[in-house]
Amino acid sequence: MRITLTNVVVDDQTKALAFYTEVLGFRKHHDVPVGEYSWLTVVSPEQPDGPELLLESAAHPASKTFRDALVADGIPSAQFTVDDVHAEHARLQAAGVEFTQPPTDLDTVVAAIFDDTCGNLIQIVTPAPSPEP
């Protein structure tokens, strides 16, 4: 068993696609019209055949309520691993991304949390180096 798809609920799929591709650097994978919305996924350019992230419309009231509760409590909707949280934080801040938590050492990872402009908090992490024996 493996993970092939997960999702984030977004206010506006077009805006989300722009943010996730132009700012974060993901690539559009699927964009299939389904009524007034789309089955819209992005993938990492480092893993084009890897897990997909569905940019799912917040049209369903339950998904929006849940997502908004997570944001109110400061809980990220998704986590992405990066090579260097400090460098990625600087790059994203320069691009105008607003962080709710700067890079913070959490023992096993260094993590930062930002607002994806589409209704979610997203966490980026870099695993802490293994202690030397």
Image: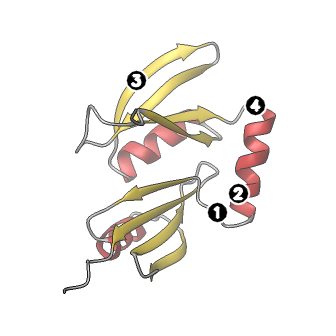
Find the distance from the CA under tag 4 to the CA under tag 1: 20 Å
Seen in the image, is 21 located left or right of residue 67?
Answer: left
Q: N-terminal of the two: label 1 or label 2?
A: 2
Q: N-terminal of the two: label 4 or label 3?
A: 3
Q: What kind of residue is marked 1?
A: Ile
Observer-nearest of 87 and 95: 87
Quickly name the residue at label 4. 60
Q: What element carries label 1?
A: loop
Find the distance from the CA under tag 4 to the CA under tag 3: 21 Å
Residue 30's disc number: 3
Q: Nearer the viewer, mark 3 or mark 2?
A: 2
Find the distance from the CA under tag 3 to the CA under tag 1: 27 Å
Neighbour tally class for label 1: few under 14, some 14-19, many 20 plus, Cα within 10 Å: some
Residue 75's disc number: 1
Quickly name the residue at label 2. 70
The residue at the far bottom in this view is: 133
Q: N-terminal of the two: label 3 or label 1?
A: 3
Residue 117 at x, y percent in the picture? 57, 53
Residue 133 at x, y percent in the picture? 19, 86
